[in-house]
Amino acid sequence: MARILIIGGGPAALGTGAELLRRGHDVRVLDHADRYADVHGAGLGFAAYTHAAQLTGTVPANRFLAAQVALAMDPGAGLDVRAELVRRRPDVVLVDAGRLTALREAERSGLPTAVLMPTLHRYLAGRWARGPVGLATRLRRLRPATLWARAARVLVATDPDLDGPLPDGAVHTGAVVGRLRPPAREPDPLVAVALGAGAYPGKEELLQRVLDGLGAWGGQAVVGIGDGVDGEALRSPDTVTLYRRLDHADVLARAHLLVGHGGHDTTLRALANDLPVLVLPGHPDLVHPMLGAAVEAAAAGRALRPDSAPDVIAAAITSLLGDGPHRAAAAAVGARIRSRDGAGAVADEVEALVPG
């Protein structure tokens, strides 16, 4: 049994942690305190940051990029990582690629360290590393590419065909999509809408346009509104049911289409369920536009501008619910995603780093 420390408790990290736990390892996650419920729900040990700035679900629009920078380069996170490494002395450390101060501390410790990229590599190495977040981190001598290159492994947990070629030292493991339920499609068309669990600028306005589009379409839909949205202020058609959180495993097995913002986790899970995806990118500096373009290039859905009018959204929903090559393309992408055990592949790579 090895002691594994995971820094960053996103879905791909938790899926990998659960697989490592199943294999008999002692797995602990270090992250912000508000991640406790998800980590505990996965059966993993948890340690909360004590020095890192605490994050909340709602970030004002004018502070959104600043919050992204803070997540990457918060010096308090480095202090917490250093303390946890001394306290637990893990055999291997697995660090989210965006937690740069945490990654630097793990690498300085001399312990075997792997980087987990839970999204497209070409986004992180491109738009993210060269955009506002990357610029701020470089000013603090936290060059993402340099830190990633120093790691023993760079594990990219996504579909290779949606991503593209990788540099030496990085490997595609396949997406970590969690347990999929057998398809149980509703007899009448059902649209699932998921625009992200977290808050980002313009989310409420985007959600309202989607709701208006659903009203113009006229069919049944289930909508997860997530954080950063006042549900009472939304105008929702009678045919739409709103939830703060969706049970994605259940809903994606029953739905016929996902309308999303281009978030990696939900988009890949929808495709793994053979669903076409309509993407209205949530934020230009996140992976959303790039993943929407990748879905459209794979002919597995469509990408619209986030300011598209409700009638345009309704027309796209109608088109994607119909028969056509997009359904076969989505099923082909889904079969490809399901053919790779992403969590198992990441776990294999982590186990390979355990000192003999």
Image (cartoon, grey):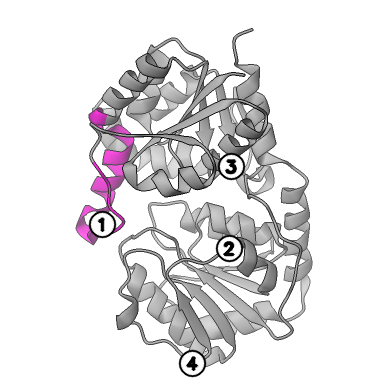
The amino acid on which the numbered mark 4 sits, given as a three-letter code, is: Asp
At mark 2, the secondary structure is helix
Mark 1, residues whose alpha carbon is within 10 Å: few (<14), some, or many (≥20)? some
Q: Quadrant of residue 354?
A: top right
Earlier along the polypeptide chain: callout 1 or callout 4? Answer: 1
Residue to which mark 3 is pinned: 15
Residue to which mark 1 is pinned: 59
Left or right of 118: which side holds 147?
Answer: left
Residue 355, numbered label = none
Residue to which mark 4 is pinned: 238
Query: Which percent across, then down, holds residue 12?
Result: 55, 43
Residue 248, numbered label = 2
Mark 2, residues whose alpha carbon is within 10 Å: few (<14), some, or many (≥20)? some
Earlier along the polypeptide chain: callout 4 or callout 3? Answer: 3
Q: Quadrant of the C terminus?
A: top right
The CA span between labels 4 and 2 is 22 Å
Q: Which residues make up the magenta segment?
A: 54-76
The CA span between labels 2 and 3 is 15 Å
Query: Which percent across, then down, holds residue 208?
Result: 39, 80
Left or right of 66: which side holds 218?
Answer: right
